[in-house]
Image (spheres, rainbow, N blue to C red):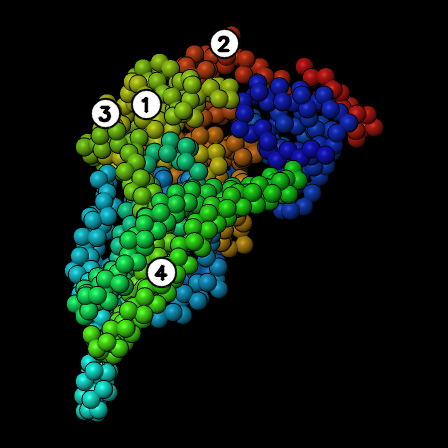
Amino acid sequence: MLILDDATSAVDAETEAAIFAALRARPKRTTLILAHRRSTLSLADRVAVLDGGRVVDSGTVHELEARNALFRALLSGAEDETPEPDRADGYGVEALWPEAAPDSDPAAVRAAAPQAGPGGGGRGGGPMSGALGSIAPTPALRRAVEALPPATEQPGLDTAQLRRPDPEFRLSRTLRPVRWLLAAVVLCLAVESLTSIAFPSIVRYAVDRGVTPGEPARLWAATAVGAALALLAWLVVAVLTVLTARAGERVLFGLRVRSYAHLQRLGLDYYERELSGRIMTRMTTDVDALSSFIQTGLSTAVVSVLTLVGISVALLATDLTLGLVALAVVPPLLAATLWFRRVSSTAYSVSRERISLVNADFQENVTGLRAAQAYRREEFAARRFAERADAYRRSRMRSQRAISLYFPFIALLSDLALAAVVFVGAREVASGATTAGVLVAFVLYLGLLFGPIQQLSQVFDGYQQARVGLRRIGDLLRTESSLETGGTGTVPVPGHLRGDVRLDDVGFRYAGADTDALTGVDLHFPAGSTVSLVGRTGAGKSTIVKLLARFYDPTSGSVRVDDVDLRGYRLPEYRARLGVVPQEAHLFTGTVASNIAYGRPDADRADIEAAARAVGALDMIAGLPGGMLHPVGERGQGLSAGQRQLVALARAELVDPDLLLLDEATATLDPGTERAVLAAGESVTRSRTAVVVAHRLATAARSDLVVVVDGGRIVETGSHDALRHAGGVYTTLCDAAQMRAGNNRLSRTVVDGDPIESEIVR
């Protein structure tokens, strides 16, 4: 059984004809086809018509054309048929806004609307919307968050400054806004270290001045001082915890905002060469590793270093001989630490790269789960994921093996130093060269000496992960955007664009490609015209649209709008005048209304309704259970492909664009709905320039200008009537489309008891 879910909507008619010819070579196979094109029905022995989740009729194409008005309306491509009026115009508020009072505040409608990112319109979601990045908050999670006490802490950072490019990213510049907090942290750490170092000296005083001579007053004095130091240490740690968290969270807030803003600036070429899982690792795992080190590991490291230095000085000052005996283990300790750093550094770098692959594989398989299940690849996907997870485990075990040697070696040195100090110290006490209090103090100092060393070793694990994470975040922030190489743009967009478009000798090659996608393209789209780009699949039509949207800059030549090179415009202002609808538009978690208002969050209900009406979507929306407030899941779950596309068209219409770019935007709509959309949009497209990538030549026939793209070059331009019989590529495409329009009119079908003829119907 072969199931084709509108599988040929994105290919041209000639390629579709070749696909159908190949499919007919397997007549014994059962095939189920979801069809939006009339040409697709050339494969069908029997056609079932669905409406409202029910099969309302079935039969041959001839039978359905004769008796079923819905079938004729769905698949009619006739130009002289007048589309039905939008029935939703007669619906009241309850139909479109069933949960909204007539005088409700439009802000309630927009409450769930995602906010546009700092890169301007047209870039939201995109490559970052993966299995990890687009998880929708559940109602239970929302309620749990609302039940939390209010968070009043303010970052105290200039977010506008954080969103600006920072090619010279350095950690020192990141820490500059919190330098006074860090100074207070260092002061607290110094106090905490001094309190730790002071305790052995207090014990020494208590033994030599209180216990040995039998003077309880001095013993109680030493006890009081020790208790005061303990209370001071507790207060310092409490303040230190808050200050460290505040400084760490502010630094990480800045890194997240800065990284996300930079991701919004990067061109599509970056996302085409980078795995989305690797990008997510930088925004999650790498940032979390840095967060953990700043908030816990850094303070532990500073305290340990200060304590280590202080105790070393205290040992030598208390008793030089015993101090030299205790510090004799430092040289082998330093050698072991350098070895551990070299081995573990490599292991952590490899581990970070491998966890990126694990995340990327996880995201790819979750988003492609339907394909994996359809082709029975669940076991293969699980096995490959397990292999990558095991590679990560092995790299982590490499560092753990180094830890298993390093930490016991430190414990061994600690025990050897303690034994040597007790042996030498006992002899000195016996000879009267030193006092018992000094020996007790030395034993306590040794415990404090190796404790910080072990803590530093433990912190080193977090330090290595934070160092790798910081390097990877820095690499991201230093990545130049392909859209900024020609300058950031200084020409403002005054109100509206006329929409006069020129491509002058444009050439373009995708990064890593061996050949040019476009070569020597010269085009002129007059302001207010509707232009269709047609051609075989892979000819370069969508590339032209991407250049017009300035998702890419041309490799050579220039793209000009209103006589200004696109690289001269301020990119956010230029994109604010665009309406872009790809073949598979992305919808966000929220409602139908919030998705329509995505490009204009300040739009009210009347604006949203007007946009839906302009593209013929109002009737569809009124038929949804919640109307405009119908919930939309991640990536448009809860809506059919055609419904998602109508919402995307309404979203583009709401921004009132001067340049409308439709990249096969109606491919998932049935011909009747597409005709209604195009007819509804005719009144508004007269005032703007519209560029349409069209595989359905009925769409191209409505255009003012047809541009035929073949092999990255412009081979024909003109009106539909002029090109239809010119004998070129467009004629070939039209003939292929017409040849498939018969829908087996000349063959008997299985309804009559005979199998479909395998030859191409001519």
Query: For the residue marked with disc 2, what is the amino acid?
Result: Gly
Picture coordinates of residue 357, whole percent (x, y): 47, 41
The kind of residue tagged 4 is: Leu
Q: Amino acid at mark 1?
A: Pro
Q: Residue at x 32, y 21 (%)?
A: 555
- Mark 4 secondary-structure assignment: helix
- Image coordinates for residue 97, horizontal then vertical, percent: 45, 56
Sequence-wise first label, 4 or 3: 4
Image mark for residue 564: 3
Q: Tell me the residue at 31%/60% (across/down).
A: 453
Tell me the tag on residue 25.
Answer: none
Alpha-carbon span between mark 1 and mark 3: 14 Å
* Distance of label 1 from label 4 (alpha carbons): 65 Å
Q: Residue at x 20, y 34 (%)?
A: 492
The residue at which mark 4 appears reads as 413
Earlier in the chain: of badge 1 and badge 3, it is 1
**Residue, disc 1:** 554
Q: Which class describes the residues within 10 Å of circle 4: few (<14), some (14-19), or many (20+)?
A: some
